[in-house]
Image (cartoon, rainbow, N blue to C red):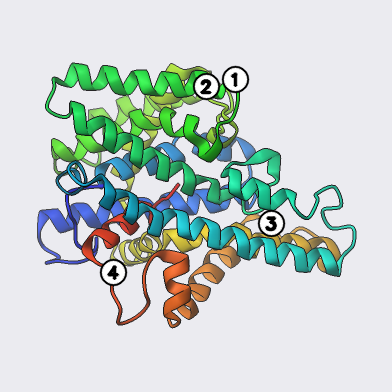
Amino acid sequence: MQASHPSLSAGTSGTPKTTRLKVIDMVRGITILLVVVGHAGLTPAVLNDMFRDFRLPLFFIVSGYLFSASKYFDNLKLLLRTKLLTLVLPYFTAGLLTYCLWAILRLVANDHSPDVGWVQPLAALLYGNYSDGLLLNIPIWFLTCLFVTQIVFCITMRYIHTRSWQLQHGVILALSLTGYGLGRVFFLPWNIDVALVAQLYVFIGYKLKQHQVLSRIRIFNLNTLILLFIFLAAAYFNSYVDMNNRVYGNLLLFYTAGIAGSLLAIKGTQLLSKSKLCAALLTYIGQESLVILIFHYGIFILLLNFLERYVLHTYLGWFPTTVIAVAGSLALNLVIKKVPVLSLLISGKRGKGSRLSSSEHDGRNAITLTGG
């Protein structure tokens, strides 16, 4: 999230600002790929567990980096309108599409999801929460969470951004601790408690941009080794992490691993940016991360799981599943872009030849990581 940005790939390629934004797109590309391989059953499991420590925190940090203070601090209605279009509308569209597919598969195979009633997934969709697996398209929980996260962050920073950094940090930390405490008692609708926990990550991303830290980050130096040591130590000593299920382990280790891992990912992305092929591929994936988030699980992994059980009678493995899910999502998006109404429902973009306003585009950038 940032002050009114153009498309992250726009502008003169040689400018430092564009280079930094390109790195952010690549970071989103890497992060959404980590999400997909996780849902595809990445092995060994310990590697997938390690990625869990920073992949969602990285989404939130990027969201904070892209936050537009100049645009939204004095216009909360614009923020609400933009995020409803670019986060909430795709959430319900994706949820209903997955429900329709699930219903068809259930009619084809009577023993498919026999313990789930017809109405339960729709109720879970309205509640905006994981709901013990009743949200059929599990990854889209992140969309409602990010929506609440951005609203809370904007309202909070609107009143404290002129105060000392100590006060700002104290308020944000208090919100995060409140979310952690609430999540231990009950899961709030639309992941409100998780959104509060995420405030510290968003705040860090916001400060990274405010102090232009990305322009000073070096790919490999002593700080890299220190960050690597901190991340590995925090990830090792903390327990399993799953923000969706409010499993944070030790909160200090949770934040330490999330921040250190995210900074390492940014450093690694800068290294990959030296390869034109990697840069182009990851930038493209990052710019389309919303549709990958929506479709990879709710359409393609759902279909693959059905085929593996009822047709193939074998497990394809995490790598083929990842390739099919990502490539399928991107291919489906190419078709959707040709239909303005579908494009609007899925991504908040009215299709080829009908661009959104700059504010709507900025909102879409905030999720095309991530979402998430």
In the rendered structure, the answer to whether residue 111 lies left or right of residue 121 reads right
Q: Which label belongs to residue 185? A: 1
Using the numbered discs, state the Cα–Cα distance from disc 2 to disc 4 in whole angstroms.
Answer: 37 Å
Q: Which mark is residue 103?
A: none
Decide: is 275 above or below 331. Answer: above
**Toward the viewer: 336 or 84?**
84
Q: Mark 4 points at which residue?
A: 356
Residue for badge 2? 182
Q: Nearer the viewer, mark 2 or mark 3?
A: 2
Residue 103: x and y in percent read: 76, 64
**Disc on the earlier residue, 1 or 3:** 1
Q: Mark 3 points at which residue?
A: 317
Q: What residue type is labelled 4?
A: Leu
**Sequence order check, earlier mark of 2 and 3:** 2
The answer to whether mark 3 and mark 4 are in CB contact below 8 A is no
Whether tag 1 and tag 2 are in contact, CB under 8 A, the answer is: yes
- How busy is the neighbourhood of tag 2: few (under 14 within 10 Å), some, or many (20 plus)? some
Task: Give the mark, 3 or 4, whose residue is nearer the N terminus.
Answer: 3
The first of marks 2 and 4 along the sequence is 2
Q: Residue at x 49, y 80 (%)?
A: 335
Secondary element type, mark 2:
helix
User: Label 2 is placed on what type of residue?
Assistant: Leu
